[in-house]
Amino acid sequence: MMHFTCDLCGKELHPGEDEHYVVKIEAFSAQDPNQLVESDLDDDHMEAVSALLQELEDADADVELPEVSQHLRYDLCCECHRRFLRDPLGKEQQHKLFFSKN
Ligand SMILES: [Zn+2]
């Protein structure tokens, strides 16, 4: 039987009894050279872009790219899920920690 605990508060989640939420986050570099941005589509830049693309094609295809994207998955209880949606990046939490006197 699958056993889950909330990744935030550690509460045990019993399938069918507790509400169980899954949060998936994908984090990746916005600077993907293979992805054209709008300014690249300008006529003035077309030549430079195609030259760049040609360069990329000519480059050794076996070169390993660094890990650019990260997939994160969290299991959350009902309460933590609600808290997460209210503050997905934990900004509130950081703020509190920053001003904590402990
Ligand atoms: Zn929780």
Image: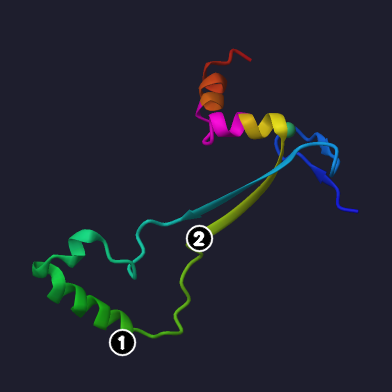
Q: Earlier in the sequence, mark 2 or mark 1?
A: 1
Magenta stretch, residue numbers: 83-91
* Residue labelled with disc 1: 58
Alpha carbon separation for disc pair 2 and 1: 24 Å
Q: As drawn, which residue projects farthest toward the front?
A: 16
Q: As drawn, which residue projects farthest toward the top?
A: 101
Question: Can you say whether 81 is above or below 95 in the image?
Answer: below
**Going 31% across and 87% down the picture, which residue do you hit?**
58
Q: As drawn, which residue projects farthest toward the left?
A: 44
- Specify whether 19 is left or right of 81: right
Disc 1 on helix, strand or loop? helix
Position of residue 33 measured from the top left corner of the image (x, y, whole percent): 32, 68
**Going 55% across and 57% down the picture, which residue do you hit?**
70
Say few, some or many: other residues with alpha carbon within 10 Å of mark 2 (under 14 / 14 to 19 / 20 or more).
few
Q: What residue type is labelled 1?
A: Asp
- Specify whether 100 is left or right of 80: left
Judged from the image, the quadrant occupied by ligand 1 is top right
Question: Can you say whether 94 is above or below 47 in the image?
Answer: above
Where on the picture, by quarter, is residue 42? Answer: bottom left
Position of residue 24 measured from the top left corner of the image (x, y, whole percent): 60, 50
Q: Nearer the viewer, mark 2 or mark 1?
A: 2
**Marks 2 & 1, CB-CB < 8 Å contact:** no
- Asked whether residue 89 is drawn in magenta, I would say yes
Q: What residue type is labelled 2?
A: Ser
* Residue labelled with disc 2: 69
Say few, some or many: other residues with alpha carbon within 10 Å of mark 1 (under 14 / 14 to 19 / 20 or more).
few
- Specify whether 58 is left or right of 10: left
Q: Which of 65 and 50 is in front in this view?
A: 50
Would the CB of label 2 be found within 8 Å of ligand 1?
no
Position of residue 83 measured from the top left corner of the image (x, y, whole percent): 61, 29
Where on the picture, by quarter, is residue 50? Answer: bottom left
